[in-house]
């Protein structure tokens, strides 16, 4: 491969690489000093100062309280009334505070006292605390694992109402109210208490004015500064720094930000690579995939910098890959047979939804119910797909806008259908009034049958083996079909109808087969989606799914006339990855914002627009 | 022969005829009084007619229904937000917003045109997706740029306790622009008809005097029809029908001006170019017309007009949903013009106005009719949404059909 690199590119690369190396060196230095003596000392000193500050203010309080008491007693002895007592205590308090300041009771500086003993006690306590929190996390994880179904509360936030089809956020909240501390945790807690008592003696040496009452009341403040659940170096550092008021200088800053520096260096190196290989990359991936791919990497780095659990986010992405994969796969036969993007896919989705409804109505559950829903869904979609294909055969070349609106109108027609369908199951019907609910829970039917099949833990992430296997199976079957005689004939009919007709292929029939396959896969896709999500969404929900699937396959590198299985997998992974990572990262950067939702609208529609601009339109005429 | 003409007529206007039937059925079952329906209808007409008329030029220029008018609507909403922020009062605020809409919508229209030129033949779907995409950008602007990067000082505009523009913009507070255009001049129906008839008669006569071919018979016919309409409107039965209607003269005057603009524009050189490009891009290009430029101009005009249309819409309602008001504009306007008998390649003022009347009649009547027929208002609501999409789908299918049918003759692709 010959790479043409312009001078500007080289200069930019060199500059970026120099910056990256500088940042990387600083970052690695910082990271390594965190465990070295000098780094440990910074944090240690800050913690000590924090304790001294807290205890100091406690000492002042104790001193003032003593003075106040003395003043009160003096007034009482002189025979004064309540009024005089109050005046005297107020005066004593101001005076005592001024004197405390003068004497320097509260303000003890680190360098002025010998802190060796206190430091040793502190280290013991921090270790004990950390052991406690580690044990707590482990015990809680165990508790969640044991009582998974009972305490997981899945919330579905409002139905999709806006036209751009906002996806309902998957929110799982875990109810820990039933959790009780284990024996081990109690033991560790006792150790923490013991360590605090030791330290307490040391503090008393420095601040003789302190009383036991005040010292005991300082415990909560001091322990919360030292350690917390899910602690990281950065959060420890921030807390200690805020409590101590020490300005740690450049070295401290390097320590604090070393992770950010190191990760930024990695990001910059990647950027330099992209700049260097810009030409071939754009050629191979296209501008949008390059942008969104880089964006994905950026999100991963940001997640690491912000200390979000990257592995669990990637695990979520994997779940979403399997969940949406089949829906995206259903675009492929449509593209290959020449009907372009099948934006009328909701027609197939409706078939799948009816299959799911029948499954609930007949009280089926587990794998049987899932398969039943798939078979019924595919049967219905095969019929609708056949007629839909016939319609499309009469409008060659104009499919996309027509299919969109045909899909939309069928979805809204089915809204009336959902209202009048004679289903009886109380799971599905509104408790009051007519018709089916907008979201129907699948707990009683086939929720998570694939997700939980053979699932296992890896690096703390649950791998939904069954889901991924099913997706892989679907991909494999479609791949196999595409290599069969019919499949090849279908691709030929899509690529060049005239030539295909000349070689004796029945183009219209091939287009109908492709359309049917697409709608049938959409039916299976929505059932897989539902089993993973735990809900079926009726009414307006299916309307925008065609767009999401289309943007995913286009993102994977398909065009409006050519697509491969790899496009499906890559596209779904990238698309879902950006969405899954985007939400927590955006929330960490701008709390409570909906920017990830905006992002989804921009990405999914932007990618379709890009594909459309590539699909045709000479400059003139 | 007459029979064939009749069938042809039905075939060409099947959507309109279907809609008239639907409206008649809905009217029969809705249980509304006619004068109430007229009141509602005139309210909706004054809000919606302008934006439907904004669709005509791109259709003539061969770009189909411009679903990207949502972007023009967004420009108008941004202008409204700015006017509220600056605290410009009353009708002045409306005028400033209208003026502000022009540059914004022109820039947006230019960009839309540029993009649509890259997807010739796919303009409608492209315009729709562009609308969705722009909605994302609009959210970005209102949630993350306004009030964060660009400070917003009016506390009524921002979300309480958070950043960004609030969900509802209230235009009808004291000194707001809400309803100011309507309040300029209102007349009962009978008098309003007289005024409009007089103006139309004047225009017709001027046209007649200036025209080279003096067609006296046509003029007298037109004038007598006008006179007849005026007289009919003075009848007690008609007065009863329109008893609740107060015609907002300024709004309908603007709509009439836009109709006139559409007619006159088509007679200019530019209008001829629109038509030439719409009929055949290749031929137009060969004739020395800069096709891309003409298409950009068509979309730009349409976007600006749509912006004004949305402005009329929101000031009439007196409030708007910041994040949802523009979404459905393209859908409703597109469906309305198709209901009037327009196709994706042909549209006139009459079709646009007729379509608006029928479409909104259905919108008013469907929920009540659904409730009375099926005992559930939701059915009527879903039915009208279905009709919106269904009408567009049907019009697109019929258009695709008629343009594909002649090509099928060689039978090359059929059963070989």
Image (cartoon, rainbow, N blue to C red):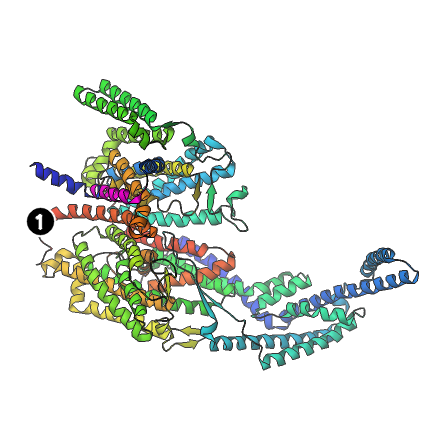
Instruction: Out of B4 and B92, give the one closest to the viewer.
Output: B4
Instruction: Out of B320 and B377, give the one closest to the viewer.
Output: B377
Compared to residue A148, the image places residue A293 above or below, namely above
Pointer 1 residue: B409
In the rendered view, does A431 fall on the left or right side of A390?
right
Q: Write down the chain letter for disc 1.
A: B
Instruction: Out of A587 and B209, give the one closest to the viewer.
Output: B209
Compared to residue B22, the image places residue A498 above or below, namely below
Q: Quadrant of the C terminus of chain B?
A: bottom left
Query: Badge 1: few (under 14), some or many (20 or more) residues near its Cα, within 10 Å?
Result: few
- Across and down, in percent, residue A273 comes to 41, 61
How many marks the image carries: the answer is: 1
- Across and down, in percent, residue B37 comes to 33, 38
In the rendered view, does A602 fall on the left or right side of B170?
left
Judged by its main secondary structure, the magenta piece is helix
Is residue A458 visible from the viewing direction of this image?
A: yes
Whether A339 is among the magenta residues is no
Magenta part of the protein: which range?
Answer: B17-32
In the rendered view, does B386 fall on the left or right side of B73?
left
Compared to residue B237, the image places residue A357 above or below, namely below
Q: Residue at x 15, y 68 (%)?
A: A485
- Across and down, in percent, residue A379 comes to 22, 66
Label 1's element?
A: loop
- Across and down, in percent, residue A326 comes to 30, 66
Q: Residue furthest top?
A: B209
């Amino acid at each position: 491969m010959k790479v043409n690199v312009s001078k500007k590119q080289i200069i930019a690369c060199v500059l970026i690489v120099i910056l990256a190396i500088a940042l990387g060196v600083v970052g690695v230095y910082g990271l390594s000093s965190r465990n070295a003596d000098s780094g440990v000392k910074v944090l240690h000193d800050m913690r000590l100062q924090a304790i001294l500050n807290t205890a100091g203010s406690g000492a002042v309080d104790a001193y003032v309280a003593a003075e106040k008491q003395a003043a009160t007693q003096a007034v009482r002895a002189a025979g004064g009334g309540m009024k005089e007592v109050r005046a005297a205590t107020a005066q004593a308090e101001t005076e005592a505070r001024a004197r405390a300041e003068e004497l320097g009771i509260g303000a003890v500086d680190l360098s002025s006292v010998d802190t060796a003993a206190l430091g040793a006690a502190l280290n013991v306590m921090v270790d004990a605390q950390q052991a406690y929190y580690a044990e707590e996390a482990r015990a809680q994880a165990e508790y969640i694992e044991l009582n998974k179904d009972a305490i997981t509360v899945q919330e579905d936030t409002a139905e999709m109402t806006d036209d751009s089809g906002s996806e309902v956020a998957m929110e799982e909240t875990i109810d820990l109210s039933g959790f009780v501390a284990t024996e081990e945790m109690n033991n560790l807690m006792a150790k923490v208490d013991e360590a605090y008592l030791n330290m307490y003696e040391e503090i008393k040496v420095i601040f003789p004015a302190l009383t036991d009452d005040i010292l005991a009341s300082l415990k909560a403040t001091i322990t919360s500064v030292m350690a917390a659940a899910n602690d990281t170096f950065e959060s420890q550092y921030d807390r200690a720094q805020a409590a101590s008021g020490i300005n740690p200088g450049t070295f401290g800053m390097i320590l604090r930000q070393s992770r950010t520096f190191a990760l930024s260096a990695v990001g910059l190196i990647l950027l330099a690579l992209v700049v260097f290989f810009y030409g071939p990359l754009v050629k191979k991936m296209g501008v949008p995939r390059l942008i969104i791919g880089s964006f994905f990497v950026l999100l991963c780095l940001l997640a690491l910098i912000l200390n979000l659990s990257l592995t669990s986010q990637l695990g979520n992405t994997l779940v979403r890959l399997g969940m949406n994969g089949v829906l995206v796969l259903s675009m492929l036969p449509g593209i290959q047979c020449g009907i372009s993007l099948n934006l009328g896919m909701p027609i197939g989705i409706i078939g799948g939804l009816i299959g799911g409804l029948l499954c609930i109505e007949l009280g089926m559950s587990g794998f049987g119910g899932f398969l039943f829903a798939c078979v019924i869904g595919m049967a219905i979609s095969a019929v609708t797909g056949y007629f839909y294909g016939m319609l499309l055969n009469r409008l060659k070349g104009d499919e996309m806008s027509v299919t969109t609106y045909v899909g939309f109108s069928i979805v809204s027609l089915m809204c009336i259908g959902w209202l009048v369908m004679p289903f009886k199951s109380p799971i599905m019907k509104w408790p009051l009034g007519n018709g089916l609910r907008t979201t129907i829970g699948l707990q009683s039917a086939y929720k998570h049958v694939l997700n939980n099949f053979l699932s296992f833990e890896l690096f703390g992430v649950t791998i939904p083996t069954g889901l991924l296997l099913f997706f892989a199976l679907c991909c494999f079957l479609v791949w196999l079909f595409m290599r069969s005689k019919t499949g090849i004939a279908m691709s030929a009919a899509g690529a060049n109808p005239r030539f295909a007709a000349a070689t004796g292929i029945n183009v219209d029939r091939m287009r109908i087969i492709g359309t049917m396959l697409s709608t049938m896969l959409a039916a299976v896709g929505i059932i897989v989606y539902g089993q993973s999500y735990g809900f079926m969404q009726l009414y307006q929900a299916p309307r925008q799914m065609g767009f999401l699937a289309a943007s995913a396959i286009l993102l994977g590198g398909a065009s409006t006339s050519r697509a491969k299985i790899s496009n499906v997998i890559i596209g779904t992974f990238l698309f879902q990855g950006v969405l899954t990572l985007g939400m927590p990262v955006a929330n960490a950067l701008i709390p409570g914002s909906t920017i990830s939702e905006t992002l989804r609208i921009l990405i999914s529609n932007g990618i379709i627009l890009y594909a459309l601009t590539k699909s045709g339109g000479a400059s003139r005429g | 022969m007459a029979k064939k003409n009749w069938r042809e007529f039905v075939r060409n206007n099947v959507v309109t005829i279907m809609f008239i039937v639907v409206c008649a059925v809905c009217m029969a079952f809705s249980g509304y009084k006619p004068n109430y329906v007229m009141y509602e209808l005139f309210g909706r007409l004054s809000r919606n007619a302008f934006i439907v008329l904004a669709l005509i030029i791109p259709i003539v220029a061969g770009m189909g229904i411009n679903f990207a008018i949502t972007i023009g609507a967004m420009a108008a909403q941004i202008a409204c937000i700015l006017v509220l922020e600056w605290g410009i009062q009353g009708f002045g605020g409306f005028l400033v917003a209208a003026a502000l809409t022009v540059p914004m919508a022109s820039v947006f229209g230019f960009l839309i045109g540029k993009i649509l030129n890259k997807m010739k033949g796919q303009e409608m779907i492209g315009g729709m997706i562009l609308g969705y995409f722009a909605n994302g950008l609009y959210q970005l602007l209102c949630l993350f740029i306004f009030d964060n990067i660009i400070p917003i000082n009016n506390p009524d505009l921002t979300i309480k306790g958070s950043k960004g523009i609030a969900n509802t913009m209230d235009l009808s507070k004291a000194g707001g622009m809400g309803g100011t255009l309507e309040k300029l001049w209102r007349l009962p129906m009978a008098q309003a008809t007289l005024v409009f008839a007089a103006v139309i008669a004047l225009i017709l006569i001027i046209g007649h005097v200036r025209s080279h071919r003096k067609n006296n018979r046509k003029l007298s016919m037109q004038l007598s029809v006008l006179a007849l309409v005026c007289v009919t409107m003075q009848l007690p039965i008609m007065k009863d029908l329109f008893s609740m209607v107060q015609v907002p003269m300024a709004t309908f005057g603007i709509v009439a001006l836009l109709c006139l603009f559409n007619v006159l524009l088509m007679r200019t050189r530019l209008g001829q170019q629109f038509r030439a490009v719409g009929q055949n891009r290749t031929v137009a290009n060969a004739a020395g017309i800069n096709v891309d430029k003409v298409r950009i101009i068509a979309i730009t005009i349409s976007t600006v007009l749509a912006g004004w249309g949305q402005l009329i819409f929101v000031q009439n309602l007196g409030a708007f949903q910041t994040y949802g008001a523009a979404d459905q504009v393209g859908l409703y306007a597109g469906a309305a013009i198709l209901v009037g008998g327009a196709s994706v390649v042909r549209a006139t003022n009459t079709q646009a106005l007729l379509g608006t009347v029928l479409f909104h009649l259905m919108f008013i009547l469907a929920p009540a009719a659904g409730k009375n027929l099926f005992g559930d208002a939701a059915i009527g609501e879903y039915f009208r949404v279905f009709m919106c999409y269904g009408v567009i789908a049907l019009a697109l299918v019929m258009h695709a059909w008629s343009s594909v049918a002649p090509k099928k003759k060689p039978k090359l692709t059929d059963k070989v």
